[in-house]
Image (cartoon, rainbow, N blue to C red):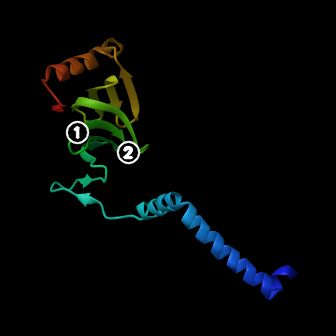
Amino acid sequence: MKIFKNSTVKIISIVLLVVGGGIFFVSLPKLFTKILTKIVDAIPAEPEIDSNGKIIYKDWRKTIQSFGSRRQFAVEKCGTTEISWFLFDRDKNKDIDEIDRYTLSPSKLIVYTIGEKGYTKLNSETAEVIQSKDINLFSEEDIKIFKELEAGKGGIKYQK
């Protein structure tokens, strides 16, 4: 374009860009701070590791036990003062349930939990999740495992 070959137009364009940028930074400091914070947070940092070699995340998540080969799942502990345990789908980066207790089947492929959403049976190989507040929707073998878990005869109970 011929208009930008004129030196006066170039100088005016540069001045307007500088003044416009200055006005942006002065008038929108909160937005600028948020953008800068997001950029800094996106820079990868070395994860913090505890004495057992497990990762401690910035939100104080700590992996208690992980399982699965094709899909990755874990039981994670979160918080410093108010501690919660979650059954977590690492592939989807999503909580399945906040749990009170859990156990693994003898084959270590199936995880049974009792939590906020009731009873959960997770097949870590197929990623099949069955959740219900009604225990009678499960098989007799599953009900037996859930009853033992409720009675504290197996698995790990989270102490609140």
Quadrant in which the C terminus appears: top left
Where residue 116 appears, as percent x and y from the top left, is: 31, 25
Q: For this view, does 54 lie left or right of residue 123?
A: left
Q: Secondary structure at mark 1?
A: loop
Asked if 40 appears above or below 121 in the picture, the reply is: below
Residue drawn at 38 percent across, 24 percent down: 130
- Cβ–Cβ under 8 Å for marks 2 and 1: no
Q: Mark 2 vs mark 1: which is more N-terminal?
A: 1
Quadrant in which the N terminus appears: bottom right
Dot 1 alpha-carbon crowd within 10 angstroms: few under 14, some 14 to 19, many 20 or more: few
Residue at the extreme bottom: 7
Q: Secondary structure at mark 2?
A: loop
Residue drawn at 23 percent across, 29 percent down: 100
Where residue 19 appears, as percent x and y from the top left, is: 64, 73
Residue at the extreme top: 136
Where residue 94 appears, as percent x and y from the top left, is: 40, 40
Dot 2 alpha-carbon crowd within 10 angstroms: few under 14, some 14 to 19, many 20 or more: few
Q: For this view, does 115 lie left or right of residue 17?
A: left
Q: CA distance from mark 2 to mark 1?
A: 20 Å
Q: Nearer the viewer, mark 2 or mark 1?
A: 1
Where residue 152 appears, as percent x and y from the top left, is: 13, 23
Residue drawn at 40 percent across, 35 percent down: 127
Name the one closer to the observer, 141 or 44: 44
Residue drawn at 22 percent across, 21 percent down: 145
Residue identified by numbered label 2: 90
Residue identified by numbered label 1: 83
Residue type highlighted by circle 1: Ile
Number of marks: 2
